[in-house]
Amino acid sequence: VFVEVRGPLGADLSGWRIQGIEGSGASAGFANLESFVFPAGTLIGSNGRNVFVVADGTGTSATLTSVPNADFIVPDMDLENGPDAVHLLDAGGLLVDALAYG
């Protein structure tokens, strides 16, 4: 599992959040437990590309992933199979982008 955040080189993602959203059942539309906040100093383009890749760690590992060239590995991110959604929120909590799947 991985999420790509694209933007201009040098864009600061510090404090931004990737949030999983439940897509079915009684809690549809509400945030689920899958969430990740970009640490201070996270910049798009530190890898020379205009994309920042956040990958799920293998098991609970923050160092191993099956996603090549990941910029950041989240231990046990485990976004659900769907139907669900992923929201990108800025440091102030405003929705910047969203993707629904499944």
Image (tube, grey):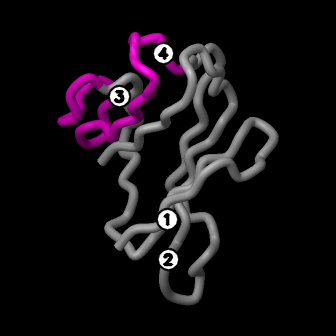
Q: Amino acid at mark 3?
A: Ala
Residue that extends furthest to the front in the rendered view of this protein? 8
The span picked out in magenta is: 44-69
Q: Position of residue 11 (x, y in %)?
A: 62, 21
SS class of the residue under badge 2?
Answer: loop
Do the CB atoms of the residues marked 2 and 1 lie less than 8 Å apart?
Answer: yes
Closer to viewer: mark 3 or mark 2:
2
| Residue 62, disc | 3
The earlier-in-sequence mark between 1 and 3 is 3
Q: Is residue 89 above or below residue 79?
A: above
Residue at horizontal 54 percent and vertical 41 percent from the top:
36
Q: Which residue is mark 4?
A: 45
Residue at image mark 1: 85
Q: Amino acid at mark 1?
A: Ala
Q: Residues within 10 Å of mark 2 (few under 14, many from 20)?
A: many
Graded by Cα atoms within 10 Å as few (under 14), some (14 to 19) or many (20 or more), the crowding at tag 1 reads many
Give the secondary structure at mark 4. Answer: loop
The answer for how far apart the CA atoms under marks 3 and 2 are is 27 Å
Residue, disc 2: 23
